[in-house]
Image: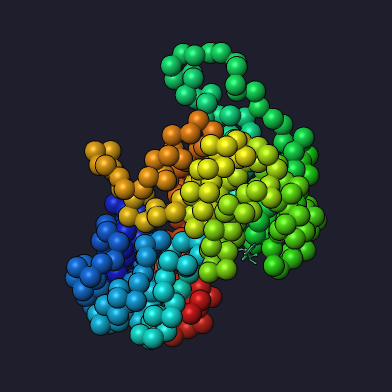
Amino acid sequence: MKKVAVFNLREFDEAEWFERYGKELGLAISGCPDAPSLENIARVTEGCECADIITSQITEELMAEFARCGIRYLVTRTIGYDHIDMAAAGKYGIRVGNAPYGPNGVAEYAVMLILMSIRNMKRILERTNIQDYTLQGIRGRELADLTVGVIGTGRIGRTVLKNLSGFGCRLLAYDPHVSREAARYADYMPLSELWRQADVITLHAPLTEENFHLIGKKTLQEMKDGVVIVNTARGGLIDSDALIEAVEKGKVGAAALDVVENEFGLYYYDHKADVLENRQLAILRSFPNVTVSHHMAFYTDNYTRTVIRDSLESCRLFLEGKPNPWQVG
Ligand code: NAI
C-alpha cells in the first residue's frame, strides 16, 4: 500500500478521518504531530512520495530535504499556498497541490467578527465576566447604517458579500478581477475610493509581494475615522505597528484579527507558561476594541472532513498519474 506522510496531524480531530479516507483510497498514513523540519522529514517521509502539510513555512532548505527524501508531491490542506516556496519546489522537481475547503466557514466567521466589532462584543464579554452590567461605552452600531468594503472577491469574499447582502448595508468591493456574482451585491471601485468610503473593511485577498502591508501608515490615513478592520486573510496584509498606532490614536475604532504577522510557530500550540516574543500581538490583544483569534476561521466540522478527503484524493491521483484538479505547481 502506498504511504502518505502527514505533518501537523492532529490526533484529537484529524487522525480518525485520515484513517477512514486513507482506507477508502488505499493509502497508508505516516503521521507526525509537528510541522516539517530538518530533524523530522527523513523519519516521517520514509517510503512516501507524497507529503500532506498545513500552513507551516516551507523554505528552500526544507524543500531540498523533502526532495532528498524522495518526496515528489507536496499537498497543503489549506486555502492558499503562500507558505510554500514555489520556486524551490520547481527547482527540486516537487509538484505542489492545494486542496482547499468550502468558503462558508471563513465567510461566516468574518461576518461574525464584523458584528462583534460594531457591537463592542469584546468589551461586553469582559464586563459580564466580572458582573459589570453597565452600559457606558458599549453602545453599538447597526450594519444597515454602515458601508462595508470587501477586499478580494474570490470564493470567500463573494460569500461574505452574499451573506452581508441580507443586512441592508451598502457594499463596496475591490479586486483586480471583477466577479459578476460579486457585482450583483457590491459596487467595485479603486482601493483609494474604498478606503475613503468604507466604515468597515474586511480582507479576503491572498498575501502576495505586491500587497504586503496593504493596510499601513499611509492607507490608514486615507480611511474614515473610527474605521473597523477585519482580517481573516493573512497577517502580512496589515502592518501591525501602523495598526497599533492607529488604534491608539482612535483612527481605527475596532479591529478583529484572526491572523497576525509572525504567527508561525505560535498558533496551535499551548504557550500558557511561555514569555512570547511577539510584542505586536501582545499589544493588539490588550486593546478592548481589538478581538484576536488564533487563525481558526476555517475550523469547522465541514472543513475537517472535506480537506482531509480532498488532500488524500489529490495524492492518489498524483500517484496514479491521473489529472489532478488540486495541482497548482
Ligand atoms: P480565492 O483565490 O478564491 O480569491 C482570492 C481573490 O483575491 C481573487 O479574486 C483575487 O483576484 C483577489 N486578489 C488577489 N490579489 C488581490 C489584491 N491585491 N487586492 C484585492 N484582491 C486581490 O481565495 P479565497 O478562497 O477566497 O481565500 C482568500 C484568502 O483567505 C486566502 O488567500 C487566505 O489567505 C485566506 N484564508 C484564511 C483562512 C483562515 O482560517 N483565517 C482560511 C482560508 C483562507
What residue appears at the point 32 percent right and 59 percent down from the top-left corner?
8
Query: Residue 232's spot in the image, x, y percent?
Result: 54, 50
Res 224 seen here: yes
Quarter occupied by residue 138: top right
Task: Report whether 59 appears left or right of 120.
Answer: left
- Above or below for 163 versus 310: above
Give the tally of numbered discs.
0
**Could you tell me which residue is drawn at 32 percent across and 55 percent down?**
265
Determine the quadrant in which ligand 1 lies. Answer: bottom right
Q: Residue at x 25, y 42 (%)?
A: 274
Quarter of the figure that contains the N terminus: bottom left
Query: Could you say which is closer to the camera, residue 79 or residue 12?
Result: 79
Question: In the picture provided, is 22 more to the left or to the right than 116?
Answer: left
Is 22 above or below relative to 264? below
Q: Position of residue 73 (x, y in %)?
A: 38, 78
Q: Is residue 325 left or right of residue 319?
A: right
Q: Can you tell which quarter of the image residue 154 is in?
A: bottom right
Colour scheme = rainbow
As rendered, which of 262 and 259 lies closer to the eye?
262
Residue 164 in view here: no
Q: Nearer the viewer, residue 117 or 106?
A: 117
Question: Is residue 92 depicted above or below 29 in this figure?
Answer: below
- Residue 151, image x, y percentages: 66, 56
- Give the residue displayed 43% in from the left and 80% down from the top: 87
The spot of residue 108 in percent (x, y) is 59, 45
Image height check: is 241 above or below 137? Answer: below
